[in-house]
Image: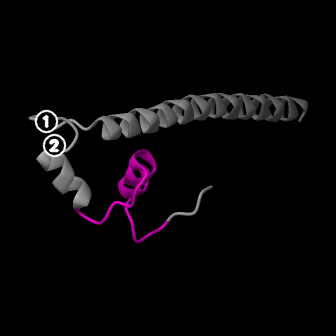
Amino acid sequence: MPFLDTCRSPLEVVLEQAVGRTVGRGSVRREAARGDGEPGGLRDGSLDAASDRVLGQIEWLEVAKARLEGRLVDAYAALHTIEEQQLARL
């Protein structure tokens, strides 16, 4: 697990990775409000890329979580079956 800097929000860390520079507290909101990425718009290509990358990570983690939960359900089912067999012997 990566080190989490509690002085910065996770959004700031992700944005720093996306744009390759330090993002100060509150500057993200100001840049988004100004629309620094596209003239006349509120979209920023580097922010879009960062959000796509993070969404990809979330999707991958959700799939991994679902697989792990499936294995956990299978393990509980096996335990339940073993307990039923033990009770039947008594």
Residue 52 image position (x, y, % from top left): 40, 32
| Disc 1 + disc 2, Cβ < 8 Å | yes
Residue 58 image position (x, y, % from top left): 48, 36
Residue 7 image position (x, y, % from top left): 40, 71
Residue ranking furthest to the bottom: 7
- The kind of residue on which mark 2 rests is Gly
The residue drawn where x is 55% and y is 31% is 60
Closer to the camera in the image, 5 or 69: 5
Closer to the camera in the image, 60 or 45: 45
Residue ranking furthest to the right: 89
- Spatial CA span between label 1 and label 2: 7 Å
Q: Which residue is mark 1?
A: 39
The residue drawn where x is 39% and y is 61% is 22
- For label 1, count other residues whose C-alpha is less than 10 Å away and answer few (under 14), some (14-19) or many (20+): few
The residue drawn where x is 68% and y is 35% is 72
- The kind of residue on which mark 1 rests is Pro
Place residue 30 in its image quadrant. Answer: bottom left
Q: Is residue 80 left or right of residue 47?
A: right
Closer to the camera in the image, 84 or 43: 43
Residue 55 image position (x, y, % from top left): 43, 34
**Count of marks, rendered view:** 2
Q: Which disc is residue 35 wearing?
A: 2
Q: Quadrant of the N terminus?
A: bottom right
Q: Quadrant of the C terminus?
A: top right
Q: Is residue 7 left or right of residue 27?
A: right
Q: Secondary structure at mark 2?
A: loop
Question: Which residues are the magenta region?
Answer: 5-26
Say how the picture is coloured: one colour
Q: Which disc is residue 81 wearing?
A: none
- For label 2, count other residues whose C-alpha is less than 10 Å away and answer few (under 14), some (14-19) or many (20+): some
Residue ranking furthest to the left: 40
